[in-house]
Image (cartoon, grey):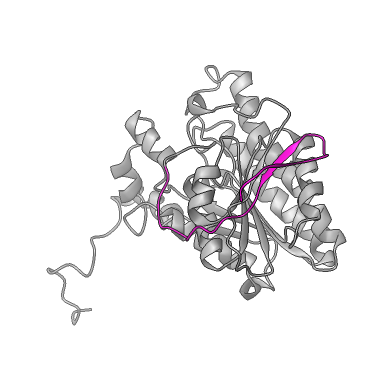
Amino acid sequence: MLGTWHLMLTPKIAIQPASDHPVLGIVAESRSYTGFLLCYNQACSSHTYSINRHTKHTMRNDHVLITGGGSGIGLATARRFREDHFKVTILDVVDPSDVAQEIGAESVTLDVQDENLIEELAIHLAADTPPVSVLVTCAGPLQRPLPPGELSWKEWDLIQRIHLRGSYACCRSFGERMARSKAGGAIVLVSSISGLRSSPLHSYGPAKAAIIHLAKTLAAEWGPSGVRVNCVCPGFTATPALARGVDNGALHEHTLKTQSALGRLVEPGEVADAIAFLASPAASGITGAILSVDAGHQVASDWDAYGGLREDQTSPHSDPTSL
C-alpha cells in the first residue's frame, strides 16, 4: 500500500515507501543544473524538499548521495552505483524522482545553494540505514563563454555559488559527519579540466579550480578521521549539456574530438567508472588525488602548434613491421 508520511522536521520532508523497480539502462533527458546558464531553473526556491523512495530491497551496506544526479555524469554515476547494489540517493534542483524510480534510487529535490536545507537533509539522512558513507558532488551548470565586460556579476556569482559554495556546503554537512563517525567515508568532488587550464569561462573555470584545491585541503583535514577526499576532472563529455552547447554554436564537436588523443568525446559512464573507483576500497590508499578523465584532451591540444596529432598508426596504409 502506498502512502505519504510527514516527519516533524523543518523543513517538512515527504517520504514515499519503497517499491521494486529494476535497474534500467535508460538515459534520461537533461533535467538538472547540467546545462548552460540560461537553462538554469530555480525549482527549489521554496524552503521545502521531498524525499521519494523507490529503493530495491537488496542493498549493500553503503549509501551514496549524488548531487546533480538527475542527468549527465550525475545520472551515469547513480546508475553505476546501483548496478553495484549500493543504496543511492539522487539530489537535484529539478525533481529527479522519475529517473530515480527507473534505477531504483531515492530522490531529493533540493537546491545546493541553500546550505540550511543541505544541513537539514544531512541531519535526516544521518539517522537513515545505512547513513551516507559516500558523497559525490556533480551539481552545477555550464557557463556562457562571454568576455568579462559582458559577463554580469549576477551570472558570475551564480556559477560560483552553485559549483564552489554548493560543493563546500555538501562536504561541510556530510563530510563532517563522516569524520565524526567511526566508519569514515569517501567524497568525490567533480571538477573539470577547465579548472586545470585556460578557457573563456571566467567564472566556471575559477570555480572548478577552487574545487580542486578544496579536495586537497579536505583530504588533509579529514584524512586522520578515515575520510578520503578525491577529485575527478572530466573533459568534454557527451552529455545533454554539451549537446546544447554544440547546438547553439558555443562548442564545436569536430574540434573537440580532433583535439583529444583518443579522437572522441568522453562518455558519462567513463567518468562514473572513475568516480566509483575512487569511492571504492580499491582506492583505499588514495586521497587528495586529482584524476582527469578527458580522452587525452590535455595532452593533445598543444600538438596543434605542430600540425596536429599524427595519423592513426593502425590504418591500412601503415606497415607494423617497419620501424
The mark tally for this picture is: 0
Magenta stretch encompasses residue 17: yes
- Quadrant housing residue 207: top right
Dominant SS in magenta: loop
Is residue 228 something that shows in the picture? no
Q: Nearer the viewer, residue 12 or 191?
A: 12
Q: Residue at 55%, 22% (x, y): give it.
A: 148
Q: Nearer the viewer, residue 210 or 246?
A: 246
Q: Residue at 39%, 54% (x, y): give it.
A: 300
Residue 240 vertical placement versus 271 (above, below): above
Q: Residue at 28%, 50% (x, y): give it.
A: 307
Residue 169 percent across, percent down from the top left? 75, 42
Residue 189 percent across, percent down from the top left? 64, 52
Residue 232 percent across, percent down from the top left? 57, 55
- Look at the image and give the residue range highlighted in magenta: 1-28
Magenta stretch encompasses residue 51: no
Apparent side of residue 308 relative to residue 132 in the rendered image (left or right): left
In the image as oriented, which residue stretches furthest toward the front? 1
